[in-house]
Each structure stands twice: as C-alpha cells, then as structure tokens.
Image: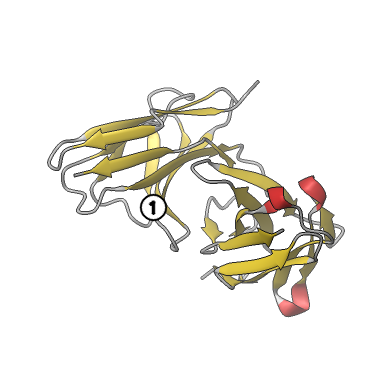
Amino acid sequence: AQSVTQLGSHVSVSEGALVLLRCNYSSSVPPYLFWYVQYPNQGLQLLLKYTTGATLVKGINGFEAEFKKSETSFHLTKPSAHMSDAAEYFCAVREGGQGFSFIFGKGTRLLVKP
Amino acid sequence: DGGITQSPKYLFRKEGQNVTLSCEQNLNHDAMYWYRQDPGQGLRLIYYSQIVNDFQKGDIAEGYSVSREKKESFPLTVTSAQKNPTAFYLCASSITGVGSPLHFGNGTRLTVT
C-alpha cells in the first residue's frame, strides 16, 4: 500500500534561511509526486509535481523538489525563506497508471521568523 | 477563469440535521473528489467520482452521501449518522490523464453543535 511520511509537523526558519521540508513515500509502482501549499482557511494550491523525466522539479514561488528513487524521497526546498511562505505544506503521491488514489502526508506547518 | 467553487464558506448546523455542501467546477474535469481535513490528520478521502452518475466510497464514507448528476457538480451531504461532522471539507477535481494533479476549491468549514 502507498503511504507518505512528512518528517516534522512544524518547521521553523528565519527569514532568508534555507527551507527544507521532508517527504518520504512508499509505492509498489512508479509514483507521481506532488507538493501542495495551504494558507489558513483556504484550499490547497499545487506547488510542483513530478511525473517522469528530470528528477529536479521547479515550482512556483521559488520552490523546487528532487525525486530520489533510491531514497524514496521527494523533499521540498527553497534557498531563501520569505515571510509569505508561512503556510502548511502537503506532500502527496498518486499511484502510476490510471489509478485515482491520491495519498496525502499529514502536513508540515512552516513558520518563518523575522 | 476556470476553477472550483465551494459554497458556503462557513456553515453552522444543529446536531441531528442533514446538511449539503455545494461543489461546482468549470474546468471540464471528469473526476471529482471530496476530502475531509482535521488538524494534524492531513486529508482523508470521503467519496470520488470518475464520471457522471457514478461514484465510489473513499476511506471515510460512513455518514456521508453524494450525487453526480452533472459533470460540473458534486454535492456532498453530511447526514445525522456522521458522528463527528465538524471539520473543513475540500472539494477537488482532476482530468483522468496519467499523473494529473488535483485542483482544489477553497473549502467549507462546517460546525455542528
């Protein structure tokens, strides 16, 4: 069965510091991987996705993530945090093929200190 | 602009009453989904529908019902059988292509007292 683990329910960084949010997955078939961001009382917005091809994926707002098959990881990074990055971030996996199953991690809340 | 509209944004009901949450999309997506979000628990799938007049139960369907009479609409009814209905409800849609992401509405916060 698929699963997604996000390490750390809360991550705190200083403005300008590196952001690293961790995501590990398990899947018996090649996965499709996604990162979403959620601001308070809003829906989820797609940051980036990995389907096939280049393992380093660039997304919106300066975020990027690298798919590492050997480590079953898809960590999200941003070189320099901005106050507006404070939000909750969700990693999700969708099984390959025509499967309709999306599995979400429990989320990581990013706090940005001035 | 295309998107998903959920209404209302906030909903208050008394225990024992059924309540219906609206979800409309103009993205021409075939698949639609309902998720429930509780603090610290991520998103849990309630129901999903791949085509009109067809839908499947997700992980936590008990106490909920849906219909899919039109491609654009996927309303969710929270029945009195749902033991703990207070939550944030998110509707989403996607195309059925391989690797397609979910597109989300802005959610409805339901409070039952």
- Horizontally, residue A31 falls left or right of residue A61, namely left
Of the 4 image quadrants, the one containing the C terminus of chain B is top left
Measuring from the top left, give residue B88's x and y in whole percent: 39, 46
Measuring from the top left, give residue B112's x and y in whole percent: 22, 43
**Chain ID at mark 1:** B
The answer to whether B79 is drawn above or below residue A12 in the figure is: above
What colouring style does the render use? secondary structure
What residue is rendered at 68% in x and 58% in y? Answer: A33
Please identify the residue farthest to the bottom as the structure is shown.
A70
Q: Which residue is mark 1?
A: B58
Please identify the residue farthest to the front as the structure is shown.
A114
The answer to whether A41 is drawn above or below residue A65 in the figure is: above
Front in this rendered view, residue B106 or A5: B106
| Residue B23 in view (yes/no) | yes
What residue is rendered at 51% in x and 71% in y? Answer: A1
Measuring from the top left, give residue B4's x and y in whole percent: 53, 29
Please identify the residue farthest to the left as the structure is shown.
B16
What residue is rendered at 39% in x and 56% in y? Answer: B38
| Residue B48 in view (yes/no) | no
Dividing the picture into quadrants, the one containing residue A89 is bottom right
Q: Secondary structure at mark 1?
A: loop
Kind of residue indicated by mark 1: Gly
Instruction: Tally the numbered discs.
Output: 1
Measuring from the top left, give residue A34's x and y in whole percent: 67, 55
- Horizontally, residue B12 falls left or right of residue A39, namely left
- Horizontally, residue B87 falls left or right of residue A53, namely left
Of the 4 image quadrants, the one containing the N terminus of chain B is top right
Q: Residues within 10 Å of mark 1 (few under 14, many from 20)?
A: some
